[in-house]
């Protein structure tokens, strides 16, 4: 919907229950701030009738004539009997220069629950319908105000739990992902058109592209797409955190290390083996990553029932862990069980290094001391590097699962194309694969989309966004 051609209504509009499509011609209203008790509450009204409805809600309706885009005005709102509801600041926007790309009014009201309810009700009585979750942002996308991955970044930004994940979402909102995807998509499309031109000359056996050049191009493309997938894994960590399990035999110093990392005594430390019967679980913000740290019960044969339970839980945690820190400690320097030894999530650490007397074969491993703190900061820093796989947190982007899936589809199609070139396959086959890759990337930014996809994406938003 590009123009503001108002669809006049007499009563409150409702979504058509017969279709999953939302009527984009409706004027919608919602509270944009949390419900409750606050200094201010913001109500949003968007759609072709927004200015008209807002005007009718004024105690003095004639004042709407003086509304100007982006100029705040202080007005009184009144109910149907002309009784005042609230004194509010109105900020009017004109299509297309607004968040949704439509006529839009923001009401900054007093933030009481009842006041806000009355304001929203009054606007509904005058013809607006309640907005569905994410409907304002959905309209922003449909009206070309933002691309699909930018709309998703809005949700990621609202949901961000750490400063670094908020910043990573803003980078996507500013086009950091879309620009990269678009440039890859354009390069692909260019090669595709060269090959497609060749399809017209099959008889003449004219090559409209250089196979070697195509192979180089495809491998470069695959490289860039893989970098984005790496971003996805790292961005996932920023958002959802990582589970790091501190493991090792009883008395290896696991609880002492956890306390050292936390800076206070959270775990019970004792020199009686098997004190930590259950597991202790804390979340810390380590260089921007929400890290869930767990101190397990010793992974030895349980000597009694309680400890057995603890041991079982430790095993299930080990299954889920993103990283396992295994403490080797004197006198035995007991190694991890054979089931773990080849596990790529495993990091071996020599603990109690303050005691000295290290066997020669262990000197190449990182040495720490939970008691004195020696080597602990360095160990944590390496842990972060490890988790981020070399990605720079200050450049990270938040990629949705959906983005990663489409990038993987593109990588697969690119790989198949390379194989086909090497097998001297027909241009027709090459073009089909390349087209798949272009389309997969197009779904990320939303140049290719379906109602179903939009419904899935925007239904996860909060109402009012
Ligand atoms: N010398 C030394 N002793 C330690 C160190 N870490 C822990 N310990 C001692 O080892 C014993 C067992 O520690 P604890 O943290 O309870 O081990 P856990 O069973 O693995 O949790 C305690 O007496 C600690 O004081 C360390 O880095 N150096
Ligand atoms: Mg312990």
Image: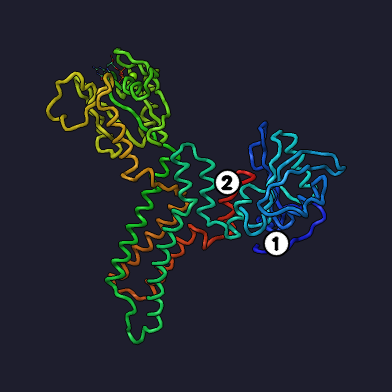
Q: Position of residue 155 (x, y in %)?
A: 54, 46
* Of marks 1 and 2, the one in the foreground: 1
> Which secondary structure lies at badge 1?
loop
- Residue drawn at x 79%, y 57% as measured from the top left: 9
Which residue is drawn at the image coordinates 35% and 57% (left, top)? 224
Q: Which residue is mark 2?
A: 460
Residue 280 position within the rendered picture, expressed as x and y whole percent measured from the top left: 40, 23
Q: Which of the pair 415/119 is nearer the observer?
A: 119
In the picture, the quarter occupied by the N terminus is bottom right
In depth, the one of 376 and 432 nearer the eye is: 376
**In the depicted structure, whether residue 204 falls above or below residue 228:** below
Question: What's the mark number on residue 4?
Answer: 1
Q: Is residue 66 above or below residue 302?
A: below
Residue at x-position 33% and y-position 17%: 274
Determine the CA span between mark 1 and mark 2: 28 Å
Can residue 19 be seen in the rendering of this structure?
no
Q: Quadrant of ligand 2?
A: top left
Number of numbered markers: 2
């Amino acid at each position: 919907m590009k123009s503001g051609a108002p669809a006049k209504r007499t009563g409150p509009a409702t979504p058509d229950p017969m279709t999953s499509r939302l009527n984009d011609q409706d004027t919608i209203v919602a509270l944009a701030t949390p419900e409750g008790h606050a200094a201010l509450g913001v109500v949003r009204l968007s759609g072709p009738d927004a200015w008209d409805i807002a005007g009718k809600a004024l105690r003095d309706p004639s004042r709407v004539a003086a509304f100007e885009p982006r100029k705040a005005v202080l007005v009184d709102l009144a109910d149907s009997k002309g009784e005042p509801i609230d004194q509010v600041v109105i900020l009017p926007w004109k299509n297309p220069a607004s968040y949704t790309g439509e006529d839009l009014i923001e009401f900054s009201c007093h933030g009481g629950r009842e006041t806000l309810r009355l304001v929203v009700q009054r606007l509904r009585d005058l013809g607006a319908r309640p907005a569905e979750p994410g409907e304002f942002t959905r309209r922003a996308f449909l009206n070309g105000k933002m691309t699909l991955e930018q709309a998703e970044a809005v949700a990621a930004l609202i949901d961000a739990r750490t400063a670094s994940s908020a910043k990573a979402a803003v980078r996507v909102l500013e086009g950091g992902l879309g620009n990269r995807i678009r440039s890859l998509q354009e390069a692909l499309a260019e090669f595709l058109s060269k090959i497609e031109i060749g399809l017209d000359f099959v008889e003449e056996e004219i090559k409209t592209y250089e196979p070697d050049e195509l192979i180089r191009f495809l491998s470069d493309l695959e490289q860039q797409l893989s970098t984005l997938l790496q971003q996805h894994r790292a961005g996932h960590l920023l958002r959802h955190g990582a589970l790091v399990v501190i493991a090792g035999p009883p008395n290896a110093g696991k609880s002492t290390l956890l306390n050292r990392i936390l800076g206070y005594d959270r775990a019970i430390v004792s020199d009686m083996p098997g004190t930590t019967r259950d597991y202790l679980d804390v979340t810390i913000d380590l260089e921007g990553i929400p890290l869930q740290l767990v101190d397990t019960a010793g992974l030895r044969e349980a000597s009694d029932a309680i400890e057995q339970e603890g041991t079982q839980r430790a095993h299930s945690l080990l299954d889920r862990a993103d990283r396992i820190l295994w403490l080797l400690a004197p006198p035995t320097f007991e190694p991890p069980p054979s089931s773990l030894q080849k596990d790529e999530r495993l990091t071996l650490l020599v603990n109690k290094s303050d005691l000295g007397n290290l066997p020669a074969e262990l000197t190449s491993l990182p040495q720490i001391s939970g008691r004195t703190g020696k080597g602990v900061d360095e160990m944590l820093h390496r842990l972060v590097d490890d988790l981020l796989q070399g990605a720079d947190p200050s450049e990270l982007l938040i990629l949705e699962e959906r983005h990663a899936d489409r990038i993987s589809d593109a990588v697969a199609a690119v790989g198949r194309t390379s194989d086909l070139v090497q097998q001297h396959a027909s241009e027709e086959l090459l073009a089909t694969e390349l087209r798949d890759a272009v389309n997969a990337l197009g779904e990320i930014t939303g140049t290719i989309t379906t109602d179903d996809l939009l419904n899935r994406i925007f239904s996860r938003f909060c109402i009012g966004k």
